[in-house]
Amino acid sequence: MIPSVHLRPGFVQPVWAGHPWVFAQAIARTTGTPAPGDEVSVVDPEGKTLGRGFWSPESAIPVRLLTRDAGVTLDAAFLQARIDEAARWRKALLGLPSPSSTGYRLVNADGDGLPGLTVDVFGDAASVQFGTIGMKRRADVILDAVTRAAGVTRVYEVGSERHQQREGFTVAEGIVRGEGAPTLSFTEGGVRFSVAAPGSAGGGQKTGYYFDQRENRAAVASLASGARVLDAFSYVGGFGLAAAKAGAREVVCVDSSASALAAGQRIAEDNGLADRVAYKKGDVRDVLGELGRAGERFDVVVIDPPKLAHSAREVEKAMANYRRLNAGAAQLVRDGGVLVTCSCSGSVTADTFLRAVALGARDMNRAAQVIAVRGAAGDPPSMAAFPEGRYLKCVIARLA
Ligand code: SAH
């Protein structure tokens, strides 16, 4: 018998309906004495098994379910099969990887039935992030399975301080399978990218690149022929480079990170796009105003700020910030031009975000005519019962 975690009455429904998280306050008691990372079974007040996960005693979410099947053991074969399945359906349904897009998210934690595990693939390399002590303890099996499923020759481990503190383990970022190299190279929409490998000097942000925006970049590319484009919060310029590749006349990328801009500049050169893509260092909150006062106008303005609300409590403050940013961006869009505005704050719903966009446009005496409300690409999938997985909004609006 594996140790079991018994839920309190009144806390069962969301878990039963498919939400993978068991919060600490939902737990009445545990039977057996699970060690950190041990497999546990989650049981309702009637004694019926709801599923199985790994035990994270220090976390506010002590169990995330990996299976609903009481008869399944979370052993090496189980983890390997889940990782293989993630690779198989991405190929079958999304065509990933393809010759023009060799970078993608292979495992998206809860969205792939593997809570606590995030894997990105960059051509012949992968980066792995362990988000729970249970996954970390099984690193060897997972790293081997990822190497095989993704067909890569090297794997890096990346860390997140938040996870490490919460779960009680440490990560030395760097190469864990194969021979290290200083960069990760991949293609997206036919553009060849190269970003710093984890643990190397000037290492990339998060897991190196934001694959969740791939399809939104393609949507921007489809609007970009002959256009003058501003890519604000550009990181290495994913949106701007896609636009330039699709025939944009001029692209300006703005970010506050010098290493992101330097990497972007090299990518533009490697792709023969440097004559049309400029990288500008600055705080977007200031730069939007400066460009506006200088009378600059663009056919397409993209803004993709970092997360502005980290919890429901921060939504109101974030709304004010989204409104201000969208006003600054709206001002720069020529009459009849397009605003592409993103939010990756999970606590801000699409409707709430659209309200901030409308108000920001209004502040500049503009009206936003929404052409599309988009989300993340399919390779970070989210479970229907797990709204936290649908954090990304990308609104495309024509500004009259
Ligand atoms: N659009 C990018 C991803 C953006 S992530 C892509 O498609 O890949 C958010 C970016 O905002 C990061 O690169 C970060 O360096 C930058 N950033 C955060 N705060 C900023 C600020 N106030 N001004 C300019 N850039 C900022």
Image: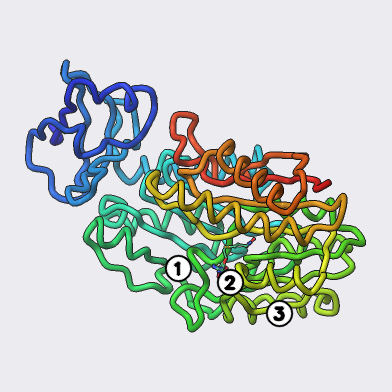
Name which quarter of the figure residue 6 lies in. Answer: top left
Q: Nearer the viewer, residue 84 or 110?
A: 110
Left or right: residue 182 versus residue 158 is right
Residue in view at x 24 percent, y 63 percent: 169
Rounded to the nearest angstrom, the CA distance separating label 3 from label 2 is 16 Å
Residue under label 3, please give it: 265
Q: Which residue is mark 1?
A: 156
Residue 314 relative to residue 376: left or right: left
Q: Report the residue at 26% width, 54% height from top.
A: 133
- Mark number, residue 184: 2
Q: Is residue 48 above or below residue 227?
A: above
- Residue 12, horizontal then vertical, whole percent: 26, 23
Let me know if residue 99 appears in the view.
no
Tell me residue 178's x, y (percent).
46, 72
Q: CA distance from mark 1 to mark 3?
A: 24 Å
At label 3, the amino acid type is Gln
Mark toward the viewer: 3 or 2 = 3
Q: Is residue 391 at least partly visible in the picture? A: yes
Q: Quadrant of the N terminus?
A: top left
Closer to the N terminus: mark 1 or mark 3? 1
